[in-house]
Image: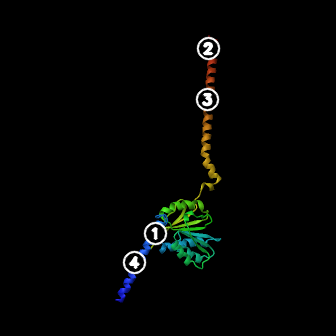
Amino acid sequence: MCCNGIIVILALVIGFAAIIYLMYQTYSYIKCGCGQYGPFVSSYGKIKEDMIEEARAVLKKAKHKMKVTDLGCGSGALLLPLAKEFPEHEFIGYEWDIVPLTMGKIKAAGLKNISFIKGDYMKQDYHDMDLIMCYVLKVTGEPLGKILATNIKESCVVISEMFPLGHLEEIKQIDSSIYGVPEKIFVYKKPQTDKKASPKDKAEKKSPVKSKTLKTKTVTKTKASSKTVSSKVASSKTAKATVKGGKNVKKK
């Protein structure tokens, strides 16, 4: 009887916790603009390890203090292990949801090189960031990529978990998985722009106009030359005819 009572109590606790979680997820979905920003889902499985490993590879090559940020950081599943391993670098997490943000701050107690900021990562300035990690929904990938393409510096590396970003130049894709389910990691950099084009490229872009103008002038000159030649030939024929006519008159 005692065991049955314990089982019933555990079932009630689990059921109550499940209801609370579903209510929280529903609230988060509505609060984030019905899917504009993903509700809190912590990174886990092999893809989490692969994300950290890719970021670790970038940080190990650093020759100066780097600024690293995680957009939609949740409770810091990616940032916290890196902040502990690389105390010489600065780590910043952006999260709109106060619940995982608070969890992250509690976990980061004692670490001086990491901070969690409540805010909209679509409205931040990333011009001084060296490494950006993100886990955003498909609907957010396109506008976020557009913002980063014009905002980050050339040396910045962007690592996106599961979803591709628009407008950035892809460096590579990494095959990963979440408990056996195939997923991908996308690595990007700032795209090349016309502003960085060499003088030679700029000259080549302008050359078709010059070529067209030159061609027009050449055709005009050719036509004029043809007319001049035709005129000379006609004059020559007239002169010959006159001479011939004069000779015939003398013979008569």
Q: Is residue 230 in view from this perspective? A: yes
Quarter of the image that includes the C terminus: top right
| CB-based contact (under 8 Å), mark 4 and mark 1 | no
Q: Earlier in the sequence, mark 2 or mark 3?
A: 3
Q: Residues within 10 Å of mark 2 (few under 14, many from 20)?
A: few
Task: Estimate the spatial distance between the alpha carbons at disc 1 and disc 3, rounded to whole Å.
Answer: 85 Å
> Please, what is the three-letter code of the amino acid marked with disc 1?
Tyr
Residue 235: quarter of image: top right
Residue 196, percent from left and from top = 63, 56
Residue 181: quarter of image: bottom left
| CB-based contact (under 8 Å), mark 1 and mark 2 | no
Q: Nearer the viewer, residue 156 or 227?
A: 156
Residue 160, percent from left and from top = 52, 67
Q: Is residue 74 in view from this perspective? A: no
Residue 27's label in the rendered image is 1
Q: Earlier in the sequence, mark 1 or mark 2?
A: 1
Which residue does the numbered mark 3 point to in the structure image?
227
SS category of the residue bearing label 3: helix
Residue 15's label in the rendered image is 4
Q: Earlier in the sequence, mark 4 or mark 2?
A: 4
